[in-house]
Amino acid sequence: MSGLKVTALGVAMLAAAFTGATHAQTSINVGCTATTDCASAAVALSEGIFEKNGLDVTMTLVGLNSNIPAALLSDSIQIGGPTPSVFLQAVDGGLDLVAVAGASSTSATTFDTAGVVATSASGIEKPQDFVGKKVGAPGIGAFLQVLFSKWLIDNDVDPREVDFVEVTFPTMDDTLRSGAVDAVVTAEPMMSRIIANGTGQVAGYFLETLPERRPAIFYAATRTWADANPEALAAFRASIEEAADIVNENPDKGRQAIAGFTNIPMEVLSSMKLSVSDPQLDQEQLDWWVTTMNEQNMLQGSPDTATLIQK
């Protein structure tokens, strides 16, 4: 009888250990700026998709996109949402980072989710009017500033004649209202908030002429973390793919998740478009960004894009 008791106890202990192992969760802090581009991560968090896939995820709001590589390197976040230009400049500078999943990309239907917003006092109405003006951007060298500069170049304006300063998304409305800058290069949901407040109006949609599926944001990590956590990375990718479908098919859930992450009211978010969630990422997309950045002399070397997407 005692032998049977021991056996039963052993089975119970094994069952408890097995149950604990299956519910063990990997902790990941995901850092993104206050845009709609990380909607897939926000939805995966709010809808319990990360948890279902064995991940304990928190999200951290990062003021400037250009701060994300340093945050990854310090391990204060494990996965971040850098723009391709910030990512490539960090790699060009010697940081060993890898892209791990797509987040958002350009689309002909969502070109107006980003733009340059100017005050009426600035007198800005066309690309040539930006010469000599002070323009705030959420990271010098980040997606918005680089593509705004490309738009200026395409309209025969030298971006070196524009005075760029870094302004975080949450402070854009106040900075523009104070007259500290003449315009801001911004995106949703902040763009709708600035316009709704009457602080400025759109002076140009610089994404309008871009090819389809150029990544605006993608998820990245240090190569060390990605190599050490293949199962967690696979679970993260599966979560992002599931959440991306929700964002694209049910934008209201995306807006609600973004509101929870950014603290921007739903009344501001309710009427705006969301960026297209695009979890796929390939080398050709990175090569396009390298070409675009080389037009602006932003890279010292030639990044080997074939090695920059974690398999």
Image (cartoon, rainbow, N blue to C red):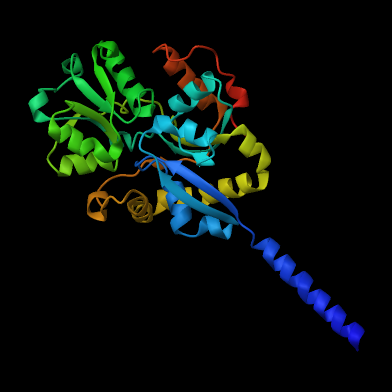
- Above or below, comparing residue 140 to residue 131 in the picture: below
Which quadrant, please, contains the N terminus? Answer: bottom right
- Above or below, comparing residue 128 to residue 98 in the picture: above
- Residue 144 visible from this viewpoint: yes
Q: Residue at x 62, y 38 (%)?
A: 225
> Which residue occupies the extreme bottom position in the image?
1
Q: Residue at x 57, y 22 (%)?
A: 305
- Above or below, comparing residue 294 to residue 9 in the picture: above
Q: Residue 266 location in percent, x, y?
A: 26, 54
Rendered image quadrant of residue 119: top left
Q: Residue 228 location in percent, x, y?
A: 67, 40
Along the horizontal axis of the image, is 299 left or right of 125?
right
- Residue 311 visible from this viewpoint: no
Relative depth, front residue between 305 and 221: 221
Q: Residue 96 location in percent, x, y?
A: 59, 27
Along the horizontal axis of the image, is 170 left or right of 84?
left
Along the horizontal axis of the image, is 6 left or right of 250?
right
Q: Residue 217 location in percent, x, y?
A: 44, 35
Along the horizontal axis of the image, is 40 left or right of 264?
right
Which quadrant, please, contains the C terminus? Answer: top right
